[in-house]
Amino acid sequence: MVKISYQQKPYRRTMMQLYGADVHPSPSPRTEVGRRILKEHPESTGSLGIAISEAVEECLHSENTKYSLGSVLNHVLMHQTVIGQEALEQMAIAEDYPDHIFGCVGGGSSFAGLAEPFYYEKITGKAPKDVQFTAVESTACPSITGGEYLYDHGDTGRIIPLVLMYTLGHDFVPDPIHAGGLRYHGMAPSLSLMAKAGAINSVAYNQVETFDAASLFAKTEGIVPAPEAAHGIKAAVDEANRCRETGEEKTILFLLTGHGHFDMASYEAYLSGKLQPYELPRQKIQESLTRLKNMYPTINGE
């Protein structure tokens, strides 16, 4: 479990432990990748890229362990399209169709799972409207809005093969925002291609403004959203407010990826004014991407 999430979200690890799991903060001294990173950065808060490397290494060294990635890879996005297929059915029941679809993106699987069935209808001429798609990132980890379309590893330890995607660089470690699921350096290859081709839009928000939207959603809808989901909510609220100002009538569909019942520490920090609006400096992005280009100059050359 990413170290900062291990610290910020204790009840998530408690539930896993309740089911019999051993949970270790990453980077950990249990793997070669973890030991190397701890040696170079003893106070590292970790990242999804590091945790993936440690999990894959653990799997490679054990005959009885299998590894299944829950995001990023294209086949995962395909399985996630059950979300969009169900949403199509629900929209049909409501006798409506979305003008705009929003969802948060870390690796991109849940957003793609919602958007791709609607995108298929759009490109095959079945959609009754020219539906638009917007992927919503964190300003602390803006893979699409701040990264580049390059060949990179899906993990920090470079165990996983290279893929072509929007990335901030595999050794990039984001700031410790509370939306842990969005703290990933890259984006799913197929979703990255859609962004590159202009089939989807992207936008980024900081965690304070997304928690503002989450607070509004909790008060009006009675549901406490996860910090990750709050990014999609923020974009949907902004679009609704824009339509109110312009007088446009739109049907807005957004993805609520999870509840925030295990994120009360995050909400406590927000309510006490301790939450920081992290925004990744452009220089830090450029340094990470320069290292990546220098590592693979032939395929990532200018």
Image (cartoon, rainbow, N blue to C red):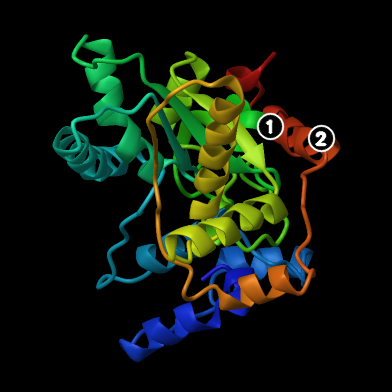
Dot 1 falls on a residue whose secondary structure is: helix
Q: Position of residue 257 (x, y in %)?
A: 40, 54
- Amino acid carrying mark 2 in the image: Arg
- Identify the residue at image location x=32%, y=38%: 114
User: Height in image: 69 above or below 285?
Assistant: below
172 relative position to 41: left or right: left
Q: Which residue is mark 2?
A: 282
| Mark linked to residue 276 | none
Counting residues from the start of the chain, the first of labels 2 and 1 encountered is 1
Q: Dot 2: what SS?
A: helix
**256 up-or-down from 31: above or below:** above
Q: Are marks 2 and 1 in contact (CB under 8 Å)?
A: yes
- Tell me residue 175's x, y (percent): 73, 56
Name the residue nearer the viewer: 197 or 136.
136
Residue at the farthest front position: 247
Would residue 26 be visible to someone looking at this image?
Answer: no
Q: Amino acid at mark 1?
A: Gly
Using the rendered view, name the quadrant where residue 216 is placed.
bottom right
Query: Residue 205: x and y, percent?
Result: 66, 43
Q: Could you tell me which quadrant the C terminus lies in?
A: top right
Reading the image, the residue beneath label 1 is 146
**At 30% from the left edge and 22% from the top edge, which residue is drawn?**
119
Q: Quadrant of residue 14?
A: bottom left
Residue at figure coordinates x 20%, y 37% from the top left: 94
Foreground of the two, 276 or 164: 276
Left of 119 or right of it: where is 190?
right
Depicted 15 relative to depicted 244: above or below: below
Q: Would you call the spot at circle 2 few (<14 residues within 10 Å), some (14-19), or many (20 or more)? A: few
